[in-house]
Image: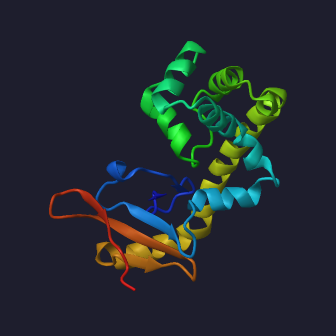
Amino acid sequence: MLENSVEEDDKAQVIQKSVSQLKVGDALLFHRGSNRDVIRTAADGILPAGQRDTSFLWRKALVDFAVREGLTPNQVHQRLREAGCPLQQQTIRLWLETDNIIAPQSYERDVRAIAKLSGDEVLTRQIDKVLSAIRDVRSAHLRASYMIAKQVVDRAVQILKTEGETSSLIELGSSWSIGRCSQSQRDRPQVLQQSA
């Protein structure tokens, strides 16, 4: 989502929201030709080669542990709680099932607990490097957010002010579009889609 997109403001940024967080009138930024997260794509351009892979060693260790031990997400959750990771079962399930999470929120604590529990030699040996890579990836995502906003905000502001609420999809060049969030018949946010 392009935040503050209709105000001329140096603080405009691209932020990621879930569908339930969208509000009517929100401007949504899309990167065509890619099924990847716009911020992640830009962040990968900032990061040194291999840095994201290093930052994901915590997840690889956790998934490998669960598979090796034949554990369900609930069993992994219980073992992590015993190892000092006081999180909800749904959080652990997301860690195991999705690869778009950079790291746990309290990654210093939780990545160390994962290393201890899993006994993963690579993670244990490179724990400081992994924690540093996580910081770098998070920082790159934040910088990418501002960079993307800076690249499109001037044009987007002009178009959004000119076309206002009447345009459902605005082209910002060959690979970027902005769509508006509108209400459906059930008063739930719905992303307007461009027909092919």
* Residue 86 visible somewhere in the drawing: no
Residue 10: x, y in percent? Answer: 57, 56
To which quarter of the image does residue 180 belong?
bottom left
Residue 19 located left or right of residue 119: left
Q: Residue at x 43, y 64 (%)?
A: 28
Residue 69: x, y in percent? Answer: 61, 29
Q: Residue at x 66, y 61 (%)?
A: 42
Residue 135 located left or right of residue 179: right
Which residue is nearer to you in this view: 6 or 35? 35
Q: How is the image coloured?
A: rainbow
From this view, report whether residue 177 is shown above or below residue 60: below
Q: Residue at x 62, y 56 (%)?
A: 40
Residue 162 located left or right of residue 113: left
Q: Quadrant of the C terminus?
A: bottom left
Q: How many marks?
A: 0
Q: Residue at x 82, y 55 (%)?
A: 49
Which residue is nearer to you in this view: 105 or 85? 85
Residue 37: x, y in percent? Answer: 56, 59
To which quarter of the image does residue 163 belong?
bottom left
Residue, far left: 185
* Residue 40 visible somewhere in the drawing: yes
Residue 79: x, y in percent? Answer: 55, 19
Residue, far bottom: 196
